[in-house]
Image (cartoon, grey):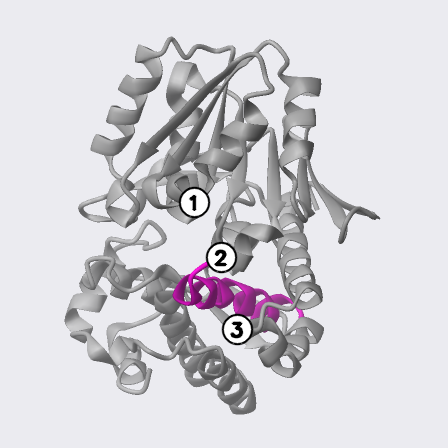
Amino acid sequence: MRGQFSLTTINTTIFMATLQLNLDSPVRQIPYFIGDDLWRDLVEFLRANFERHSVFVLSDDNIARHYRDRASEVLDSLSHFRGMITFPAGEASKSREMKAGLEDQLLGQAAGRDSVIIAMGGGVTGDLVGYLAATLHRGVPLIQLPTSLLAMVDSSVGGKVGINHPVGKNLLGAFYHPAATFVDLRFLATLPDEDFRSGMAEVIKYGTTLDDEFWLYLEKNVDAILRREPDALAHIVRTSIAWKIRVVAADEKEGDYRSILNWGHTAGHAVEKLSHFRIPHGFAVASGMRVAARLSQRLLGFPEERVARLEALVQAFGLDRYRCSDFDPEEIWQVMTADKKARGGQPRFTLMRAPEKPELFYPVEKRELFHVLKYA
């Protein structure tokens, strides 16, 4: 394993956990602070590490409407806080045009290498603003402040940032780790129900590929999680981030093992694109996990009982609203062949041979995919 993983826990109002991602080449230590009401902790971190840097917050207009006042109230105590820049919410903002427009605004306010950019928002914000930070002046310090469950457990962890291209999703991007990530669970209290359920798809991904005990926990605690009970939220967020960190520490640049995190994403990204991104990411991934599970059973002998359990869990969290079978299989295939994981015009899937035993970059023939799509 090329990286290391460490976990320490200390007590605050509810709790605070610090997960640290240690990457060997180059040597980097990236803290992930998880807790309740972390605004003051964010300010202390900025003062300790970026005292003379100008600070910009970038956020979509929905998040800004709810949290602009709180962010300004706390960050105004910093002598170099330059304010908040907003952009339209939604997947359409993950574009070259939006990135260029935000760059123009930052440069117009004299943002330099001595600037820190805070990405406050969901997955779109983290991806877009992270990629902007990676390229502005060849890289300026980035802090991730995820506000959605999906961003907390997946997109803000591991350094993948990027934007979409008309050909496909996330085709332009970089690996660019933040200086720190602050996961404030209070954001989840006001997260819309659809967005919360969407994030649960990524949580389910960790349990069904990496951690049988966590899978059982999810099955037994559906109601507590959907009620957003604090202990349940703390457990699923910490466990998910811990697994993502372990995977990234082992394979930072997705050479092999990290692709286990693509479980459900090959088919999921296809239906997401074909819906013109009207299907939320997590719901698309949930439909993609059903496809991947059935392919795993058909091609690799993954236990049918496991397939049934996964489909039941997806249904229990209300993630079965959309199905890959609702789309033209030929169009799904065409989108998959343009996916960045495809090789020689053939889609590559993350499949499971047995519990916690993945098959990575597995080539799937069109006839096999079409057979499974009828039932997923």
Label 3's element? strand
Residue drawn at x 30%, y 11% is: 108
Residue 331, horizontal then vertical, whole percent: 16, 67
Camera-side residue of 31 and 119: 119
Kindly report the distance in space between the C-alpha atoms of the residues bearing marks 3 and 2.
35 Å
| Magenta-tinted stretch | 191-211
Is 205 covered by the magenta stretch?
yes
- Residue at which label 2 appears: 190
Check disc 1: other Cα within 10 Å, few if <14, some if 14-19, many if 20+: few
Quarter of the image for the C terminus: give it: bottom left
Crowding near the residue tagged with mark 3, few <14, some 14–19, many ≥20 C-alpha atoms within 10 Å: many
Residue labelled with disc 3: 352
With 148 as the anchor, is 214 left or right in this view?
right
Mark found first going from the N terminus, 3 or 1? 1
Where does label 1 land, which residue? 66
Give the percent coordinates (x, y) of residue 325: 24, 80
* Secondary structure mostly seen in the magenta stretch: helix
The disc label shown at residue 245, or none = none
Give whichever of discs 1 and 2 has the lower sequence position: 1
